[in-house]
Amino acid sequence: MIERKTEADIELMRESNAIVSDVHRLLMPLVKEGTLVSELDTMAEDFIRSCNARPAFKGYSSGSKTIPPFPATLCVSIDDEVVHGIPGPQALKNGQIISIDVGAEKNGFFGDGAITLPVGTVDPERQRLMDVTREALFLGIDKAVPGNHLYDISAAIQEHVETNGFSVVRDLVGHGIGRRLHEEPAVPNFGKAGTGPRLEAGMTLAIEPMVNYGSFKVRIAKNGWTVLTKDGSASAHFEHTVYISKEGPVLLTNHFERRDG
């Protein structure tokens, strides 16, 4: 069942998502050559806890008895890492692209958002990959209006990505969000327009295109968490938590960027 939130619920979700946005705003200036990824993670955790919230990803269980819970606050994915990269002591290098995925829980509600950023100067194709992925996110968000179908979002994302020669990951999808980090429905980044559940006011979705430069196929690293492109090509990831109001989509994580830049 897809849960619909009340106005009171949305007000609480604004708080948790504002924290997510503030973490991104805090970390963006630090994404440069020489910064240790572990430093970003420490700063994010300290900030989230200072807001009387908790990191949503730290301690998250995959449900597998053989894979330990996720050990960090951030998912930091670099170059061919698609999502769920585990922050470590490695230093960022010029020319890399880095995805920072943030989750926070406060007052019983979750916020979730991701951005991909260049480290220093990146080659034009990597920049285009990031640009197209972000554009696809907003084209998908435009379809998040009452009366549309869920896969209208998916189709808009897929069409823009594939028209530009990239591919959308099939094995990972967006999701509903609210009292739980992952709620129904699954929000794939591919699909046929006019199909899927009907969208209604009060739904809250984490829309998150994950786009590969090459093939859409992925593999899992030995740590059991990090998802990488199978062909070693670069990948980009952007995510907003979106509230579907009667008037249309409202970006609950829109504190660090705006559509017009």
Image (cartoon, rainbow, N blue to C red):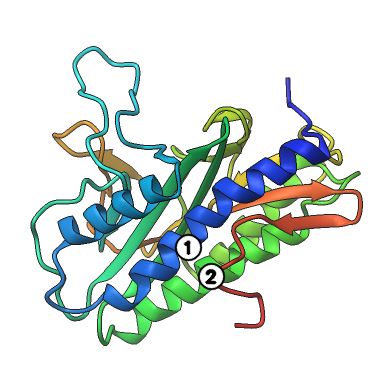
Locate residue 84, reporting x and y percent. 31, 44
Secondary structure category for the residue under label 2: loop
- Residue type of the residue flagged with mark 1: Asp
Name the residue carrying label 1.
22
Locate residue 261, reporting x and y percent. 59, 83
Res 143 quadrant in image = bottom right
17, 63: nearer the viewer? 17
Name the residue carrying label 2.
256
Residue at 22% over, 57% down:
232
Res 259 quadrant in image = bottom right
Secondary structure category for the residue under label 1: helix
Locate residue 104, reporting x and y percent. 46, 43
**Residue lying farthest top?**
65
Residue at 73% over, 43% down:
10
**Tags 1 and 2 in contact by the CB under 8 Å rule?**
yes
Residue at 73% over, 48% down:
243
174, 192: nearer the viewer? 174
Residue 240 numbered mark, or none: none
Upstream in sequence: badge 1 or badge 2: 1
